[in-house]
Amino acid sequence: MKIRQLSVFLENKPGHLNSVCRALAKEGINILTLSLADTQQFGILRLIIKECDSAREILEKEGAVVKVTEVVAAEVDDKPGGLADILEALEKGGVNIEYMYAFAAKRGERAVLVFRFDDPDAAIQTLQRAGENVLGNVDLFEESGA
């Protein structure tokens, strides 16, 4: 149920983000979702891509520093308190969230969030015990048409 995410380290300068997107587009690789965090000097672009290994190779050939990390995607009720409910289950389970971001598209009437946990296996167990739907690669890529 863990999903592989690419983290690409970028200088915070014009054109660096575009170079990553262009390199992937040139090879026909679609970005399912992404998050960009920055400081004054650099940024971290986090990507969920079906062709993770190919994308990593392409970006490294372009000179990018790329790291693969495991994240967890879970459905969340898209209503007031939906996120609070899932966060409460994680808190009760003693699970720490390092960061999170959302997919732009929903799965039916539910939102999808990507979480980076300090202990992804414990997080998955906690979420499943709380009745939350943890998604795998197949769920994400089939739903998105990727």
Image (cartoon, rainbow, N blue to C red):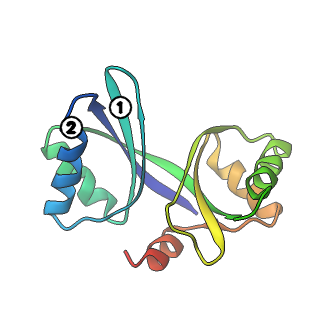
Disc 1 and disc 2 in contact, CB within 8 angstroms: yes
Identify residue for label 1. Answer: 43
Looking at the image, the residue that sits furthest to the front is 80
Label 2 element class: helix
Q: Residue at x 46, y 79 (%)?
A: 142
Label 1 element class: strand
Identify residue for label 2. Answer: 16
Looking at the image, the residue that sits furthest to the right is 92
Q: How many marks?
A: 2
Q: Position of residue 131 (x, y in %)?
A: 80, 67
Looking at the image, the residue that sits furthest to the top is 40
- Distance between the alpha carbons at the discs numbered 1 and 2: 10 Å
Q: Nearer the viewer, residue 21 or 92?
A: 21
The kind of residue tagged 1 is Gly
Q: Nearer the viewer, residue 107 or 94?
A: 107
Circle 2: is it few (<14), some (14-19), or many (20+) Cα within 10 Å?
some
Q: Which quadrant: the N terminus?
A: bottom right
Q: Nearer the viewer, residue 144 or 130?
A: 144
Q: Position of residue 89 (x, y in %)?
A: 82, 51
Q: Residue at x 81, y 54 (%)?
A: 85
Q: In the drawing, does residue 28 fall left or right of residue 128?
A: left
Q: Residue at x 22, y 29 (%)?
A: 13
